[in-house]
Image (tube, helix red, strand yellow):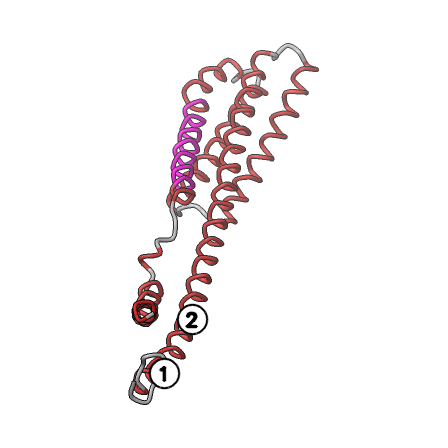
Amino acid sequence: MKGGAFGFSRKEIIWFAVILFTSLSLLIFCITSMVSKYYHYSESAHTKIHNYSGDLWNLQEISLFSVSMQRSSVNLITYSGNKKELENVQVSIIKNRDSLIAKLTQIKQQNRMEPIVLKKIVDAGNAYLVVNSAFRQMTADSVQKIKAADFNISSMRPTLHNLSDLTRATSKSITREIQKITHSRLNVFSLWEFWVLLIVLLPYLYFFCRFVSLFIKILLWD
């Protein structure tokens, strides 16, 4: 041995010390960075799923309130001769109408959906509210009451179908996005920290092999 220890030269020992300090620093940095990225990725995925779930719930309620309005509105014709039942029907319509308006306002304020999709849903919801008001005015007018049934078939029902189709299609799209996020994972091979970490560990592998080689030589000498 030439002024070294454990079979290593002084130059190798100095290089080992420098590499050890540098590699340990890089090791800590890379591991910390990877853990941080994984944490932020998980938090981002959780937030997206939470928002998407909220949007799904809002769309389901929009569909529920509009369908309930439709059923109650048709009952204005069915129970036209029953004053007490008509009062209950009117209360139900107003309750669902207010809930629908509130829900349309909420999704507009949250503004989490695609702008074009959001506009279509809000416009379709407002359009249904307009035709529903027109239908209720017809049923309250003894002269126009006869036309109410035709108006329901030609205008109110198609407007409701348009809103229902939009909410259904959007719900399916959101569900697919949730499934994508649920099944997606952070690809460690796409992180530059992983490759730096791999390079940093190579010198340790080299010195490990040297130690193993030295240990075998000692055994053979014995």
| Residue 133 is at least partly visible in this image | no
Give x and y (percent) for residue 94: 62, 29
Residue 17 in which image quadrant:
bottom left
Give x and y (percent) for residue 132: 51, 27
Residue 29 in which image quadrant:
bottom left
Residue 76 in which image quadrant:
top right
- Give SS at disc 2: helix
Mark 2 or 1 closer to N-term?
Answer: 1
Q: Is residue 147 above or below residue 46?
A: above
Look at mark 2 in the image and give the residue it sits on.
29
Give x and y (percent) for residue 212: 33, 67
Q: How many numbered discs?
A: 2
Name which residue type carries label 1. Answer: Ala
Decide which of 9, 198 is in the foreground and name it.
Answer: 9
Q: Is residue 85 magenta?
A: no
Give the magenta range.
Answer: 157-179
Find the distance from the CA under tag 2 to the CA under tag 1. Answer: 31 Å
Left/right of residue 154 with respect to residue 47 in the rendered view:
left
Q: Residue at x 61, y 12 (%)?
A: 79
- Give SS at disc 1: loop
Q: Is residue 48 above or below residue 202?
A: above
Decide which of 161, 151 is in the foreground and name it.
Answer: 161
Residue extending farthest to the front is 222
Name which residue type carries label 2. Answer: Phe
The disc placed on residue 5 is: 1
Residue extending farthest to the right is 84
Q: Residue at x 41, y 24 (%)?
A: 158
Q: From the image, state whether disc 2 or disc 1 is nearer to you.
A: 1
